[in-house]
Amino acid sequence: MAGSVSDYQRVEVSEAKSFCERCMVSVGTKPDHAAALAEVLVCGDYRGHYSHGMNRLEMYVKDIKSGTTVSDKEPVILKELAGSAWVDGNNLLGPWVGKFCMDLAIKKAKEAGIGMVVAKGSNHFGIAGWYSLRCVEAGMIGMAFTNTSPLVVPTRGRKRTMGTNPLSMCAPAANNDQFALDMATSTCAYGKVELNDMKEIPIPKSWGSNAKGQETTSPKEVLTEGGLMPLGGTEECGGYKGYGLAVMVEILCGILGGGNFGPFVRQWKTSTEVANLGQCFIAINTEAFAPGFEGRMSTLLDTCRGLEPAEGETEVLVAGDPEKRHMEKVDKEGGVLYHKNLIRQMGELAKNLGVESMKTKEA
C-alpha cells in the first residue's frame, strides 16, 4: 500500500459489487451482464490486482453509453466440435462473453477431456484469472488468454504494436489448495502505470519506455508518448521472451478467433470504434489423464514453499499465494482498501449517472 492509511478508505466487497452494478444498469446494461462485470472487477480488487478492478469501471460505462459495446444481445456459437467451439461475442461486455465461453469449455472438458473455446467480437474482460479459477472450482485445470489494445513496444522498437496480452493458468491441488498464475506478457499491466501516475510516484525500471523506445521511470512518458515494455524489460534482461509470449497469445486469440489483432485493435480507451477482441479459454479435465493429479500438485507446491529462502527473504511463494493472503486480509478487515482519489472519481461518476454513491468506511 503506497502512502499512509489516511489516503485510503475501506469498502465492503458486497457494496463494491453493488455499486458497479448500479452504475452499469443505469446506462442500460442488462442486470445479469452488469452482475458478471461487477463480479470480475471486484474480484480483481479483492485479490489485490487493483489495476484491473474498479478503476476500470468508468471505461465500461463509457463504452455502453457510446454504443461501442452493447448489452442487448447474447454470445453465439459459430462452429462447434466435441472439444472445441468458435464463438461470436457480439460486442458484449468481456466478462459476460468470457463467462459464457469458459462455462462452455468446462462442459466440453467434462465430456471430451479437453474443452477449448475461442471468441471474436469481445471486449476487455478484467483479470484473466477469474476465468481460469472457474475451472478450479470444477476440479479442472483452466487457462485463459486475451489480446488487448496495442500498449506494448516490441523489443528493439519504439511504437506500441502488441497488447499486454495476459495469460492465466490455474490448477487445483489437495485440501483446497491451488496454483493460480495470472500475468501480463508485459512487465506490468498498463493500469499499474496509471495508478502510479494518479498517485504521482515514479514507476520501476523495465515497466515502460519513452518515445525513443528507451527505458523510463516516468509514468507520464509511458502514458503519453511511449509504451509498456515486454515482460523482462530490455533485450539484455530477456524482454524478447515477453515479446514472444505476447505474439503467442495473439495467435491463440485474435489470429485464431478471427478478431482484430496486434496494431489493428482499437486504441486504449477509445470509445468511437468496436474493439473486436479475440479471447481463448481452455479447460482440462484431469480425470482424463493420470490419476492422483491433485496429490502430485500439492507435493510440487509444498516442495516449492518449503525451500530455504534466499538471504534476506523469509519464504518462497507460488503463484496465487499473495492473492490468497490479500483476500484473507480483506476478509479480516471487513473490506477492500481504495485510494481516496479513486473514491473521489467514483463519487463523481455516481453523481453523473444519478445513482447512489458507494458507501465507505474509514481505513
Image: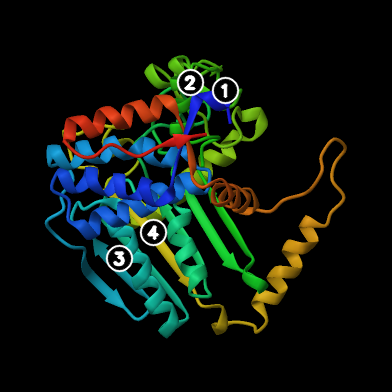
Residue 258 visible somewhere in the drawing: no
Amino acid on which the number 4 mark rests in the picture: Cys
In the image shown, does 84 or 235 lie closer to the viewer? Answer: 84
> What is the distance, in whole Å, between disc 3 and disc 2 at their CAs?
36 Å
Q: Secondary structure at mark 4?
A: strand
Tag of residue 15: none
Decide: few, some or many residues near mark 4? Use Cα within 10 Å; few <14, some 14-19, many ≥20: many
In the rendered structure, are the residues bearing label 1 and label 2 in contact, judged by CB atoms less than 8 Å apart?
yes
Query: How far across and down, in percent of the image, does residue 46 sit?
Result: 49, 48
Q: Identify which residue is drawn at 46% across, 44% down.
A: 45
The disc, 4 or 3, on the residue closer to the chain's N-terminal end is 3
Q: What residue does disc 1 label? A: 3
Q: What residue does disc 2 label? A: 199
The disc, 3 or 2, on the residue closer to the chain's N-terminal end is 3
The disc, 1 or 3, on the residue closer to the chain's N-terminal end is 1
Residue 14 visible somewhere in the drawing: yes
> What is the distance, in whole Å, between disc 4 and disc 2 at their CAs?
34 Å
> What is the distance, in whole Å, between disc 4 and disc 3 at their CAs?
12 Å
Q: How is the image coloured?
A: rainbow
Query: How far across and down, in percent of the image, does residue 164 sit?
Result: 44, 39
The disc, 1 or 4, on the residue closer to the chain's N-terminal end is 1
Q: Give the number of the mark in front: 1 or 3.
A: 1
In the image shown, does 286 or 301 lie closer to the viewer? Answer: 301
Q: What residue does disc 4 label? A: 280
263 lies above or below 139:
above
Task: Tell whether 355 sits left or right of 170.
Answer: left
